Image (cartoon, rainbow, N blue to C red):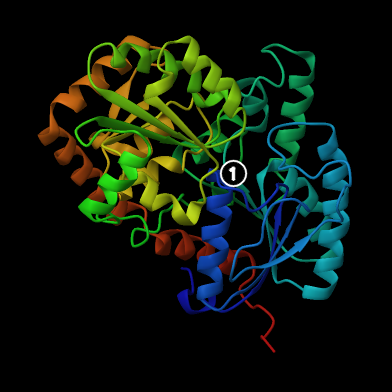
Amino acid sequence: MQDTDAAARPRRVLMIAPTSFFADYGCHVRIYEQARGLTARGHKVLLCTYHSGRDVPGLSIVRTPALPWRRRIEIGASWHRLLLDFLLLCTAWRAARRHRPDVIHAFLHEGALIGTLIARLAGVPLLADLQGSLSSEVVEHGTFPPGHRVLGLLRRLESWVDRQPARLLANTHHTARWLMEDFGIAPAKVRVVPDVVDTERFAPGRLSAEERQGRRQALGIPPDGFLLVYVGLLAPYQGIDLLLHSFAQVAQQIDAYLLVMGFPHMQRYQRQAEALGIGRRVTFTGPVSYFELPAWLALGDAAVSLKLSQTEGNVKLLNYMAMGLPVVALDTPVGREYLGEAGVFIPQGDSQALAEVVCRLAREPAERWAVGRRLRERAVVEFPLSRAIDAMEAAYGEVCPAPAPML
C-alpha cells in the first residue's frame, strides 16, 4: 500500500521540456500547471527548456543557449530541433549536477529520450509525461504521409523510449490503454496524470454584462449576435479548415460570428475566411495570453474544438468546460473522456453536421445554458488541479520513497 506521507514529502524535481516554453497552447498549459502545483506543495522544481519562449512568474527555468538564426517559437517538427535537443541535453545535465534532483520528470518523447540519458548519468529515476503517440502524431500533423518508410523507424524508437522510464505518466485513460495495448507496456509502469484546469481562474462571470458587451462591440459583434469561440494552434490537424467551411454554412442561416484565438498561420486562414465570404464575421486575434484567456472566453456563447488526433490530449476542452460554455467537438476517445455525456459531438469531417449543431445551439439558449452548466460541474469534480498533483506525488513516491532532505 502506498505510504501517503512518503508520497507527499518534498522532492527536488528536474523537469525537461523540449519545447519553447512558455507559449500559449495546450502542451505548455499542462507543463505550467503541473510545475505550479508541485511548487505550491513545497517541491523544488527546476524546468529545463529551449531558449525561445517566455518566463512565467513563480517558476524556476533554465534555458538552452540561443541560436542566433532561430529565435522563433518552435512548433512542429524541424531539423533545427535536433540541435536544440542536443543543447537541451547539455543544459539538463549541467542543471542536474547543480540541482541534484530526486526525480527527473520529462515531457514528450523527445524529453523522455533526453531524460533517459540524464537519469542514467545522475542515478535517479525517470518519469516520462506523454500526451500522445509520436509515430501517430507525425502523420496527423502532416510531417510524413501514412506508410512512409521512416514511420517504422520512429515506431521502433518510440517503443524503446517508452520502456526506459520507471513510470509513464499518461494524460488520459485512453493514452494509458494505448501504451499498454499497442506498445505492450506493463500496467505497473503506467499511471494516469490527467489534464486539469484551474476552475477558480476559469469560471463563469469573469466579465460584467457591461464589460462583455463593450468588448464584443469593440470586435464588431452585435449584442444579440451568436459568438462561437476557438482557442489553440491554427493548423490543419486542429480542424481549422473544417471549422471555417462549416461556419460559412452557419453564416448563411443565422446572425453568427466566430472568434479565433491562436497562432501561427493567421494570415493564411484570414485569406481563407475572405475567400469563403465570411471575412467580416470571423475575427482572428493572434496569440492570446493564457493568463488573459478567461476574459476572452467569457465573450462566447459556445466553444468548438475539431482536433483530428485520436491520441493527443486537448486541454482547451477543459478551459471551455470550466467557463460554463457548451462545447462542440469531434467524436474522439479523448473528447469523450473529457466531455463525458455532456459534450456535443459530431462525426469527423462532417461540416454539415457541425453547422446544424451550431445553428441549433444558437437558436436554443436554454439548451446552451444546461449543457454549459453540466460541463462546468464536470470540470470542477473530475479535473481539478489537485487531482493531477496527487497523482504525480503518488508516482514520485513509488520510484523515490526516500528523497534527500531539503536544505
Viewer-side residue, 202 vs 394 = 202
Answer above or below: position of 177 versus 265: below
Image x and y of residue 57, in percent: 59, 68
Quadrant in the picture for residue 119: bottom right
Q: Is residue 378 left or right of residue 104?
A: left
Viewer-side residue, 152 vs 48 = 48
Answer above or below: position of 49 versus 122: above
Viewer-side residue, 76 vs 218 = 218
Give the secondary structure at mark 1.
Answer: loop
Residue 190 seen in the current view: no
Residue wearing tag 1: 186
Image x and y of residue 98, in percent: 83, 74
Amino acid beneath label 1: Ala
Quadrant in the picture for residue 42: bottom right
Image x and y of residue 205, in percent: 24, 55
The outermost residue toward the bottom is 407
Q: Quadrant of the C terminus?
A: bottom right
* Label 1 crowd bin: few (<14), some (14–19), many (20+), radius 10 Å: few
Q: Is residue 102 left or right of residue 23?
A: right
Please tell me which residue is depicted at 72% across the width and 18% down the height of the picture.
Answer: 144
Q: Is residue 34 left or right of residue 45?
A: left
Please tell me which residue is depicted at 31% across the width and 45% down the height of the picture.
Answer: 321
